[in-house]
Image (cartoon, helix red, strand yellow):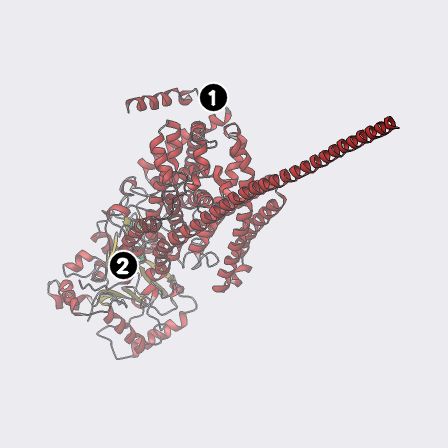
Amino acid sequence: MEHIFYTLQDFMVHTKGITYLIMGGLLIALPLFWLFLTGRDEKNKTF
Amino acid sequence: MTITRRKFLGWIGGAAAGSATLAGTVAHGASNKEFKGYPGSFGVLHDITKCIGCRKCEQACSEVNAMPAPNKPFDDLSVLEKERRTTVTTHTVVNKFDKREFDKSATSQSGNAEDSGDKLGGDKQVINSSGSLFVKKQCNHCLEPACASACFVNAFKKDRTGAVTYNESLCVGCRYCMVACPFNIPTYEYDEPLTPRVMKCTLCLPRIQEGKLPACVEICPKEALVFGEREELIKQARMRIQKYPDNYVDHIYGEHEMGGTSWLYLSPVPFNEVGMREDLGKHSAPELTAGALSAVPIVVGLWPVLLTGIYAISKRKDKIAQEEQKEAVAKVKEDAQEQMALKLEELKKKMNKEREIAIKTEVKKALDQAAKASEAKATKLSEEEQ
Amino acid sequence: MTLQTISIKSRLINNPLIKKVEWTPVNIVTAIILVMGFFLTIARFFGGLGTVTNLDDNNPWGVWIGFDLLCGVALAAGGYVTSSACYIFGLKRFHSAVRPAILTAFLGYALVAFALNYDVGRPWRLPYPVFYSPGTSSLLFEVGLCVFLYLNVLFIEFTPAAFEWLGLKKIRSFVVGLTMILTIFGVVLSTLHQSSLGALFLIAPSKLHPLWYSGYLPVYFFISSMFAGMSMVIFEGSLAHKYLHHKMDDTHLSESDGVVLGFSKAASFVMMGYLGIKLIGLAIDNNWHHLFTGWGLWFLFELIGFVAIPAFMYAVAARDKNVKFARIASVFAVLGIILNRLNISLIAFNWHLPSSQRYFPSWMEIATSVFIVTLGIVVYRFITAYMPILYEHSDYKHDNSNQNANSHDD
Ligand code: SF4
Ligand code: SF4
């Protein structure tokens, strides 16, 4: 998909739009990965 | 492609020139890293030296945009006495600035201009003789509009014709665009309780799309306004400065201000003397905010990692502390037991010893007694024998 | 299920909610303000911004943004500061301060959102930036998105108190299990929108006085939000002690001095760091010469009078373990934050305009802000009166003390 941006403004709306989506993904992915990472740790919690 | 009013009309002949010219833009393989704006987009060159302050453009603007008629008619020039700004019902205003220290240069300029036989594109170098300068003010249709960069619903868009458009159906009315605009252009319908709009010049986009000139350019009797491709206008402005260096300061206002604007200005005096700020800098609005915006995703990416790290460390510390405590408690217990055992043993030993001693003494006693007894027996026996 | 609803109902009914309001002077003033607010609301939504405010085309933002939004958000930073101190940095002695701080933060943000409805032209379009037409190049979009998300996070963080009040044990323990992730989200979102509030002004270098304009504005706003939050926790705590002492349990009372002194120490040091980066800001833009103008004096007044001095007072309070002194310092620090936000949004903004074109709020604008703050206090009083905020609910005492060990992850 070749798209030409003529103004920095349009370029930023586009790229920031994508980064915001990535940010949302990260916020979900990081905790899940942490769960995976520590999944085998021995449970010594109180709950 | 510089177009004055008459030329433009003749040349186009009613065709939709705007769209025709711009249709070819796809061919320009502009790089995505550097942004030069829409190729072939239009602009207006405002030559301050030619403006006579007749307010015709104000009138045309008002009519085209179907604004209510003002209290004082447009031919009443007394309104020029006070510096004005754009308002909800006036998208453009002409302001008057008294010639002060620049009087001298202006007169010499007018002489100069009349002498020079070389006319530029048919333009006559007419310097108005009233002793005042008139400057038209309206939205400059920035190449990288601050209002568009600021708007959080994308209500403003830079059109490929060059116009910066406003979409009323998206606007929330936060007025951040007004905070952002370096030229203080957008206005707001403060008296509208439920449907306030942001109001500003449209560059007559609907007219441009019909192949017409912006109303103000069309009506200007002195050709103080010239509509055309921005690139061409810049070239023409340079040429004017070159041809009549005494007429103009060597600066095309709008070529670089805030990243450049579609409206361009030529002035005989430094621009800050005619109410235009010269300290705006060349950085466009999106450049000013790019740094802060690009920090945002990094925070989202790194903060959770860092914070979880800190959390894990503090938690680990807690755990270690807990374990140490446990150990310590256990040790104390153990120690206590050991000591207890030791003590017990000692006690036992002591007791044993004491018992032994006791036994010994008892035995001794017994033995002694036995011995005594036997002795006594023996003596008794021997006595009896004797 | 029906049993539960019945019990909730009975709780709601039996609660002294319907208890007759006593007409103490405070309550009378409150009532007057609320009635006035009602009329101002009508004036705003039937007459438009023009009838109520002194805003104009040169000064599009007034106290409703400068005070309600900027100060409101900064002073509500206590939520993320306290919860991160307790749960992330593992400073458990702050535990009893977390709930009141979360509550104030939640109310603060709710009021900010409420106040925005007065300020923007078409409030029903406020969801547009997030759901309909995101203007991602705008810092206001960033602020809007984060404030919206954070309001939700704070709401969830606050719900355990309400669930305890209503006796909903299961759902409460589920939410408590989310504590850790909510706290981290809270810090991320707070970092972003606190700093972006400062970054809002990056786009207008030609309007804000150079002493206040800086490329570091987002950093300044973020750092100052930290000590704003801590100062607000201390300040609010002293008010609560005065008026709601009877609502506090022993844990809260015994920990509160420690919280005050701990935050004094932290705030003091952060403020010194803030002064340091302010100095760096001056140096990096070579703004020294502005210091010797009237604006410079005003700038120094803000920095020395309302940052350096309270920082020093906090330090003395922390060294002497003088809780009272720390509370006095917190008043100055809070005023300093307000002064700073007003300077940036109103006082040093448009500084180049002639005074006739400058903005001064109308009494109705100020009254509306007072109304909104009052509304917040009323709700706070209601919630602290009925929900386990300043004390731990007897059913969950043990649970709460283990909360920091409780987390969904690790
Ligand atoms: S002059 Fe102002 S309103 Fe016009 S495009 Fe530029 S920033 Fe927008
Ligand atoms: S007032 Fe309207 S156009 Fe201006 S920034 Fe806000 S939403 Fe966008």
Between marks 1 and 2 in the image, the one whose residue lies nearer the viewer: 2
> Foreground residue, C363 or C327?
C327
Front-most of residues B50 and B249: B249
Q: Pointer 2: what residue?
A: A15
Q: Give the structural element (helix, strand or loop) at label 2.
A: helix
Task: Tell me residue B63's x, y (percent).
Answer: 21, 52
Label 2: how many Cα within 10 Å (few below 14, some 14–19, many 20+): few
Q: Is residue B350 above or below residue B271?
A: above
Which sits in the foreground, C181 or C198?
C181
What chain does badge 2 belong to?
A
The answer to whether residue A12 is visible is: yes
Residue at x-position 40% and y-position 59%? C206
Q: Chain of mark 1?
A: C
**Which residue, as the protein is rendered here, is positioned at the far front?**
B385
- Looking at mark 2, is its residue's CB closer than 8 Å to ligand 2? no
Find disc 1 in the rendering and name its residue: C22
Q: x%, y% of residue C240? A: 51, 33
Percent of width and height locating residue C345: 43, 50
